[in-house]
Amino acid sequence: MDVSREITKRIADGWFHKLKWSLSAWNDSQQVAIRDMRAFLLVARDEIFALNDLDQRRVKHEQWTYSLNQALMGKSHSDAAAAIAETANRFEVPRSFFHEALTAIESNLFRERLVNNNDLLRLAYRQTGTFMLSAAKIADLYEPLHRDYFLCLGIGVGVLDVIMDWQHWEKTNWLPIPLDWVKEVSGAEAALRQGDWRKPLKISSRVRRTLLPSLVRRMATLGIETLTQAKPTSAVQDSRWYADFAQWTEQSLDQLHDVFSSPEKLLG
């Protein structure tokens, strides 16, 4: 368990550092909890995609689902799942959040086609929106009155997270781009659509040069629009965590604006 917690902390801290987020308002036990919640998807995804064979990845995904369910019932099946389940049970984090995160991995694993904005926002929710709702639960701010704020914050940051994960998507031969965004571009839809999910995704140099920067800009715009709808309630503003939430929002907006200005830096 101690080794698993160290791995969890390292992976979560890497994510917080990447986003330039502070955790100054959280006490020690809350910091452990929020790292557990953030690391869950990242740890599971890293284990699944560390395998090269697609069938092995599918089996590993099933093993993670099983281990999580067992751990949440108090039946330790793996140290990583047990550590995360301990936090989930302590703070009464809804189990559905973890299953949504595993669904995000499943979408990636089976290269699900995203059709429109809503599909991309749903992926952002599963990856990061559920984490933000978990943070609200840990901060005891999970009441329905505050939920829209945390949803908009989580989904907006989730879009940024999708963008910053670009190298991961390409390595897994899948790009989370809604097909509706490229319908009017000759040849682009065919380049991004995969009839057989087992075949590697092939992006031509022309599509990479002419299309991907504009698509990443559109993602950044969607993230900015979503974040600007995150309106904190007075109770959230008066809470001791609000300074961190406000800092998270500001840093995320800054990075989304940077992506919009220079998408080429991200794409390499």
Image (tube, helix red, strand yellow):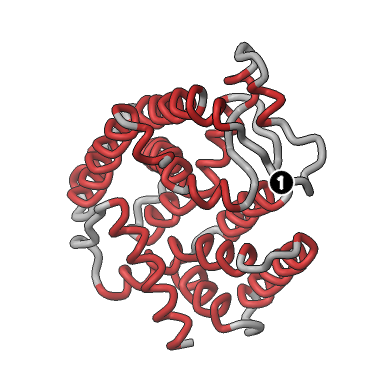
The answer to whether residue 199 is seen in the rendering is: yes
In the visual, does 131 lie left or right of 259?
A: right
Residue drawn at point x = 41 percent, y = 50 percent: 132
249 vs 141: above or below: above
**Residue under numbered circle 1:** 200
* Residue 118 image-quadrant placement: top right
In the visual, does 267 lie left or right of 50?
A: left
Residue drawn at point x = 72 percent, y = 71 percent: 63
Q: Residues within 10 Å of mark 1 (few under 14, many from 20)?
A: few
Say which quadrant the C terminus sits in.
Answer: top left
Where disc 1 sits, the SS reads loop
Picture coordinates of residue 244, whole percent (x, y): 22, 52
Picture coordinates of residue 165, whole percent (x, y): 47, 48
Q: Amino acid at mark 1?
A: Pro
In the visual, does 210 lie left or right of 113?
A: left
70 vs 238: above or below: below
The answer to whether residue 151 is seen in the rendering is: no
Residue drawn at point x = 38 percent, y = 56 percent: 135
What is the total number of numbered labels drawn onto the structure image? 1
Q: Could you say which is closer to the camera, residue 4 or residue 184?
A: 184
Q: Could you say which is closer to the camera, residue 266 or residue 90?
A: 266
Residue drawn at point x = 71 percent, y = 46 percent: 200
Picture coordinates of residue 193, whole percent (x, y): 71, 31
